[in-house]
Amino acid sequence: MLPPGSSSCTDTLSISSRSSSDLDQTPERPAKRSKKLEDPATAAKEVVLAALNHKAGGDAVLADYRSKNTLTSETRRVLVNILVGHMVEMHGRIPTRNQREQYALGIVILFPALRDPYSKKGYEHFYDVDSGTGYLAWRLKTVQRNTSHRAAKGDAASSDLGGPCLKRSINPEEHLDEDAVREAIALLCHTSEEGQIFFKMKETFHHRHGLVHDPDKTMDILKIFPRFLDTKGLVNQDFRLLFNPETANKLLEKWDTVFKPGIIEEAMGLTLTPAVRSLISSAGKQTIGEDHCKWDSNLATLLLLVHLLPPQPGGKRAAKISAADAADRLVVYHKVMMCVNCFCRSHVLSRPS
């Protein structure tokens, strides 16, 4: 038999052993949590370190930081150029916001002295998610602009490439002389018969195609041929005349299944300004917060393309406008020349489509 009190001693020892084991295990849980929280930072650091080890000049940046515990302005520019080059190589010309932010986070993790102590996250000077600015964003825009400029030169030098600048061959039998073209244009301005409009627009297609390639007259096409604004199907007819019907139908056939979802997906990686948020909401026929759909879904998707286009190459004197202003210029409102009451009685009120 056990002596009296031995059971209580055993219980006390077992309780004490369990308590001590619980205390030993308690610190491990927050350690695991902190490790999980550090994973994004560690991954970002590894991405930046891999880019510096992979690209020429990266070793010099690392050595300069080790010796001075900081980076000069010149070395910092080299660092940004290397990382943007690696970013474009890995993620394409238009990386997402999360990808840009990962590189910015990796910089301040790998180089703690470059962290900004007065900003919220410490790396906004490299990339600010809210405003889309910073060293990485500015360098990325320069790369996009230069890439677009080189691509434009390549297209001009090679006649095998397509695009709107390529002068395609058109059946010469359907060409009209200048007098016949002027008569057809005059008739188009006065006739209201749809069949006659389509026929005359087809006859003047070659003349109109020449205007497209004339930099001085390309902006006047809608003034010379205003029927594009009030007659549905004329753009499609020109497209069929320029290409074969099979090619012309590909855009419409794949629009809802391929092109439109792809544009919306790419736009989600843009900086979500109020204009972009509104267009994404309209394109997806969804409501974000208190925003309401302001555009037809298809038109909103086309307007998103303007925001996805890279900046146009140009000199210091070239006029520059924002993507939002460019989108506003893309939509042309046509005056119907009637009072509001008459218009409301003859049309169903709807948003532009």
Image (cartoon, grey):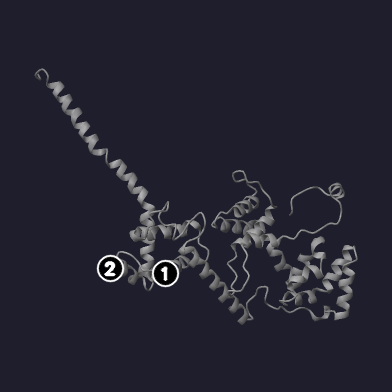
Q: Nearer the viewer, residue 63 or 234?
A: 63
17, above or below 226, in the image = above
The answer to whether one can see residue 254 in this image is no
Element type where label 1 sits in the image: helix
Say which residue appears at 40% left-offset and 55% top-offset. 122
The residue wearing badge 2 is 67
136, above or below 42, in the image = below
Query: 285 left or right of 86?
Result: right
x, y percent for residue 160: 63, 79
| Disc nearer the start of the sequence (1/2) | 2
Q: Nearer the viewer, residue 236 or 82?
A: 82
Query: 177 left or right of 303?
Result: right
Classify 10 Å Cα crowding around label 1: few (below 14), some (14-19), many (20 and above): some
The residue wearing badge 1 is 77
Element type where label 2 sits in the image: helix
Q: Amino acid at mark 2?
A: Ser
Query: 13 left or right of 234?
Result: left
Name, please, the residue furthest toward the top: 4
x, y percent for residue 247: 70, 68
